[in-house]
Image: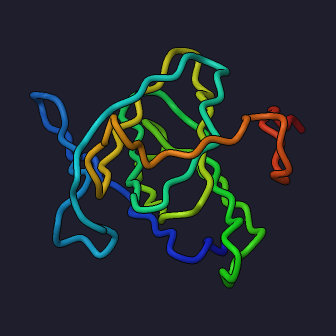
Amino acid sequence: MDLIDGVATKPLRVIPDERGWLMEILRRDDEIFAGFGQVYMTVAYPGVVKGWHWHKKQTDHFCVVKGMMKVVLYDRREGSPTHGMVNEFFIGERNPMVVRIPQGVLHGMKCISDEFAILVNTVTEPYRREEPDEFRVHPHDNDIPYDWGRRDG
């Protein structure tokens, strides 16, 4: 898949033993790492779409640690070499990876597992309640060329 300019992925490796397993998510010496501001988690219930939103300053590093999510990115940055491109990733327990989402790229996620999914996000900027760097677009009523519906077949 061709990636939106500035987007990067890192496949993750699960290391199991008789006690359980370990999965390293993100290191500051990773090529994909863009900086540290804070880490938070968000939960989505089955079938729920959370999105769209974008940031002016913040870069996100998404990793789904429970369940499965469809993470979708849309580049509507004027002047970007990938303007108009959509990327779709299926990440979580069945496909562990980190997706780096640069500033200005719209993104959203949908829980596609039978139970809730947990997404851990390592962001480059701490959240500022008095002046949030988060700009929202309605998940369904917009001009984004993407349909969150399931495609069977």
Q: Position of residue 71 (x, y in %)?
A: 59, 45
Q: How many marks?
A: 0
Q: Quadrant of the C terminus?
A: top right
Q: Is residue 59 above or below residue 64?
A: below
Q: Is residue 10 above or below residue 38?
A: below
- Looking at the image, residue 92 sits to the left or right of residue 19; the answer is right
**Which scheme is used to colour this image of the protein?**
rainbow
Q: Is residue 55 above or below residue 153?
A: below
Residue at x-position 30% and y-position 68%:
34
Residue at x-position 77% and y-position 36%:
148
Where residue 75 sits, quadrant-wise, is: bottom right
- Looking at the image, residue 33 sits to the left or right of residue 83; the answer is left
Q: Is residue 78 above or below residue 60?
A: below
Residue at x-position 82% and y-position 33%:
149
Q: Position of residue 64 (x, y in %)?
A: 42, 38
Q: Position of residue 139 (x, y in %)?
A: 73, 35
